[in-house]
Image (cartoon, helix red, strand yellow):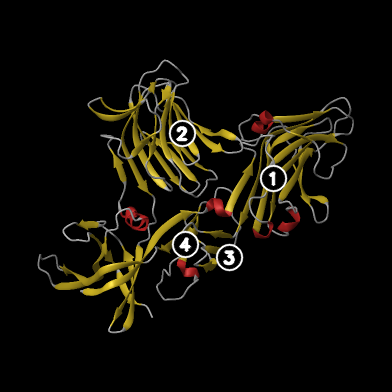
Amino acid sequence: MYAGKDVTIKIQRAVEEDVTHKLAVVLSYLGVKRADSGSHEAYHHSADSEPTPPFGTELADDEYDQIARSDDTRFSKSTTTNLEYAIMLLRYKCAFAESEVKKIVVKFEGYGTAPAGNGVTMKIWDHVSSAWSNEVSGTAGTDETLTITLTTDIGNYIDDDGYIWVLVRTTNPSDGTTAAELYCDYASCFVSRAKFTVDHTPISDRDMDGVADESEHVTVKVNGSEVTVSSVDDSEGLVILASGDFNEGDVITCSYRYDSDPFIAQEFTIEPKQRIEGIDGLGSNVIQIWAPLLKEIDGSIKEVLKVGDADQIERTKPLAPEDYDPFNNLALWTKLTSYGVAIENFDGDNRLKLYEENSQHGSVLFIRKIKDFDLTIKIYGYQNPYASSRTYIHFKSYSLEIYHWDGWIRLLRKSSESGTYLIAQSADGVMGQNAWHTLRLRVHGSHIQVWVDGSKIFDLYDYVDASEGDLRLAIYARITYFDDLKIKAIEADDENGIIATWSQAGSAVKIGLDGVIFPEGSLPIPKNEPVYIVTPFKARSIKVIT
């Protein structure tokens, strides 16, 4: 059925975001340097009482690294002054506005020793009453974890500069002869809130009832279970939940649709159908009844091809299931070095070869920026006698470094303030040289996963910038071959929607199509001038919007 011409089309694009880092953040000393300012800081001190913050001597860079991970590498503070305690002062810069925070959880992993007994005491600063409060204590002489959890009067524990202060000391003091010693393996502060802003706006009228700002327009899940949404602002993309009581390790996702920019279709057709299926209820190979099943709608959108139009490219790009590059050429890559990059027949097929030449280490940049993605690539590290030689896969603000000599992989995060620092490292022998390996990298919001030859190597969460970023392949002092790159955007399980508006007999007609998929993508029709593209689609239901 021909529905109309000069139709205004607005596609509701389905998306699922990992919003964990927008709602819950672990503040730690990973990557912190003494030269940094305005962020997290830690101090050591000794005294016979509990001073008012700030106080003490700031940790050095190597000492910050000692408390950045739970790895049995500990910072220690010792005092032999009579009746003095070994003390640490921990300062965390809250990631959210004070008024938004719903929960604070501070943790300290370590222990204390002293003549009168082992143990550590931890408190948090209440800047309203100007006192250390919420005391917890341990009694161990080996690592134990102390925890303070706060869900009420949150503003009392975040000062006017946005800092959370925590005091940790040996439970008992020195006697002047035997030291009081405080050991810290890891320290962190978890904060959570109940509001966030989605990446894409405006949020669509997903139920197509013509009513804006409904909670039904989004679905938020915590560890796979749906939670209550209090309010939604479609235009701003603001979502407020009924609760911000999350826990470290929770995975929080938001599924919704967002409106694409409206565009004009020269033709818009829809053809409702109803599938019919014959049923043999007697096992006789004879159909006793024809059963009508679910209705479906076929349709198409015809529009003028606008060469180089960014909006049209962006609209049709997600319809392609994935990018695939067998490396027969460099069509999808930009050379970042004049030397050290080639397409070469190796092991019976064309491959991308990165190598060192004229003191340049080969490097190439993917032509598009990437966001949430699932990537696989085959990698062959050619024999090299230098243990420091390596292959890089740079993505967004992260790097995977492959040391083929020993076969291990490191994951690092880049920081404009603190340089690059290690997040995780695999065991030896994971990805050696002189053999093909298949590496898979999946990044969805704050969730990063890495597999080698089907075995999962990393599965972790880390704070990430939600914006798009570059993908770059590089080497250092070696030869590496690459083949069969596949990059697929991670999209929502939900289907898209279409809102179509046109004029008919002097009246405006507005319909909504739900459960829309684009199984074939956009098809060019080059026979006419101007050139058109036609985008076929299928929809599950149709309704008139009033």
Amino acid type at circle 3 is Ala
Q: Residues within 10 Å of mark 4 (few under 14, many from 20)?
A: some
Q: Which residue is mark 2?
A: 400
Q: Is residue 74 visible?
A: no
**What's the CA distance linking mark 3 and mark 4?**
22 Å
Q: Amino acid at mark 1?
A: Tyr
Q: Mark 1 near mark 2, Cβ–Cβ under 8 Å?
A: no
Question: Of residues 254 and 168, which is closer to you in this image?
Answer: 254
Numbered disc in front, either 2 or 3: 2
Tell me whether circle 2 and circle 4 mark residues in contact (CB < 8 Å).
no
Comparing labels 1 and 3, the label whose residue is closer to the camera: 1
Q: Which residue is mark 1?
A: 92
Circles 1 and 3: CB atoms closer than 8 Å: no
Q: CA distance from mark 1 to mark 3?
A: 26 Å
Q: Nearer the viewer, mark 3 or mark 4?
A: 4
Q: Disc 4 marks which residue?
A: 201
User: Up-down: is 267 above or below 94?
Assistant: below
Circle 2 sits in a helix, a strand or a loop, which is it?
strand
Q: Amino acid at mark 4?
A: Thr
- Secondary structure at badge 4 equals loop
Local packing at callout 1 (Cα closer than 10 Å; few below 14, some 14-19, many 20+) is many
**Viewer-side residue, 479 vs 361:** 361
- Residue at which label 3 appears: 242
Place residue 511 in its image quadrant.
Answer: bottom left
Please state which amino acid type lies under the numbered disc 2: Leu
